[in-house]
Image (cartoon, coloured by chain):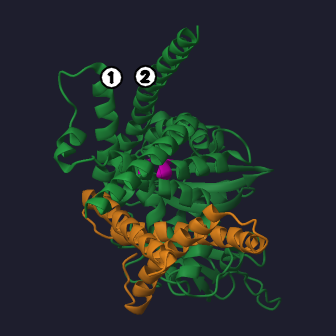
Amino acid sequence: MKKDSTLTQRIAGHQKKWYGQWHTWAGLISGLILSVVSITGTILVYERELDAWLNPDLFTFEQTAQTRLTLPQALEVVKADHPQMHIEVIYEDQFRNNCIMVAFEEGELHKQAIVNPFTGKITGSRVYADSAMGIIRSLHRTLLVPEIGKYIVGIASLVMVILMITGLRLWIPKKWNMLKTRLTIKSGASVKRQVYDLHNTLGFYFSPVITILALTGAAITFNRFLIIGLFLVSFEPPKSIESILGQQSTYDANNPIPMKVEEVMAIANREIEGGAVKGITLPHDSLGTYEMNIIAPGYAETGDRSLVYYDQYTGERLMSTHHDLPHLGKVYLNWVTPLHYGTFGGQVTRILALITTLVIPVLFISGVYVWYGRWKKSKKKAMQKKQKKQLDHA
Amino acid sequence: MPNAIIQFGKSLRYAFYFLVVSGVMGLIYGAFGLTWNPLFVMIAIVGIFVVINFMIATLLVIPNGLLSLFGKGNAVLFRYFRHSLAFVMVFLAYFLFLKIFELKVFF
């Protein structure tokens, strides 16, 4: 028995040493990137509200009618006012003063136009990536580094998960009667000790949310792998994103007139019980499809999202994520982004996500402070040892 | 009992701890939003990464196995594969559980 407990202690000591090294170096290398991503993430929790607040000329609407326009009605007004506009998507945005947004192509640029939901008139258009919030979003997602930036952020998110695993292992006290010291900051102690306690306690209390934000962030970056993985673990043959999204309408030269948006929308509104269309992607050419973004009540406050594709000439359903994909696909559609933004549970979880993103830079700074103190101490010790050795030799 | 089986048992235990901790983390975050579903969601997301990791481990262990025939294999890679295999078994059991009982918990 005694032998067993000694072995366990030895393994625990060995594990702690390795975990400590992983935690230190992973933290020092990726900490700065994670801090930038976290601070920009803090702003992005309220991205759309801030965007509306920063652009009052675009997002202030006088209520000139009793009811808001439906998406097809707004589309009709926009098309009549701007017949040359190549509209790709139209959707409702409840977080930007309930406006209607239109995404369109202008030359090589992908722009968005903001539509007054009462009149259908465009209040302005822009390239979102060039707006203040667009730049912050790019910084968060890619660090403004083209192509490889998103992978750097994705890998840093996975490193964050490693930091959490190793950090939790290091947090476990040697003896359970020391637990209280790991859960509180010792008042009246030296600054060094208080910073160490702050690192430990904040890391422990926020570990669930930090881990979830990091994992969902990595899932967003590596979404293709996630979707293929979801098929695999559904025990169904994997489908590529192209085969899911690459649906085509059947062009019939005898019946070349596409159905009206309101007709397809009426079909889509009946598709899923309690569901309503919140966004429409229009067919881009004669083989394109209508893609309806349908939100139905779900467990999360953001609802149960489904994408349904219709033949533009017949209104036939070609593919529905609700009916034709495994239920596990809903993990990606309904949960990954809401968990990452904290929107799944309303304001409480959004504020929690916001606070958590502020905690990450604090963990980085306090971690560097603890490491620097130890590094200086070990350097001093090594120097003393060297001097002693030289003296002994002399 | 052979040492390899004992070690594999330990790996299975670690994998089970990871599954439980993932679920608890989801449950805690979900509790703030008055919903328990993140419990299942988090195990599923961690499970996908475990499956991807297993694929990487498999790709690494095959050439390592061939090299070991000539006495040049790396023991660390075998240990990595053992952990990955245990993790994927535990998480696949969870996905199988969802499939068999047709749990619709992700709406």
Residue at x 63% of width, y 64% of height: B75
In the rendered view of the protein, which quadrant contains the C terminus of chain A? top right
Give amino acid for label 2.
Gly
Residue A171: x and y in percent read: 33, 45
For disc 1, the marked residue is A192
Determine which of the numbered discs, if any, sits on residue A373 in the image. Answer: 2
**Label 2 secondary element:** helix
For the question of whether residue A341 can be seen, the reply is no
Give amino acid for label 1.
Lys
Which colour denotes chain A? Answer: green
Residue A162: in magenta span: yes
Determine which of the numbered discs, if any, sits on residue B93 in the image. Answer: none
In the rendered view of the protein, which quadrant contains the N terminus of chain A? bottom left
Cβ–Cβ under 8 Å for marks 2 and 1: yes
Q: Main secondary structure of the magenta part?
A: helix
Tell me if residue A80 comes above or below residue A227 in the rendering.
Answer: above
Relative to A308, is A8 on the left or the right? left
For the question of whether residue A150 can be seen, the reply is yes
Residue A27: x and y in percent read: 51, 39
Residue at x 62% of width, y 74% of height: A228
Q: What is the magenta range? A: A160-164
Indicate the chain on which mark 1 is placed. Answer: A
Say few, some or many: other residues with alpha carbon within 10 Å of mark 2 (under 14 / 14 to 19 / 20 or more): few
Residue at x 64% of width, y 56% of height: A103
Which colour denotes chain B? Answer: orange
Between A306 and A365, which is closer to the camera in this rendering? Answer: A365
Residue at x 72% of width, y 66% of height: B73
Tell me if residue A55 comes above or below residue B39 in the rendering.
Answer: above
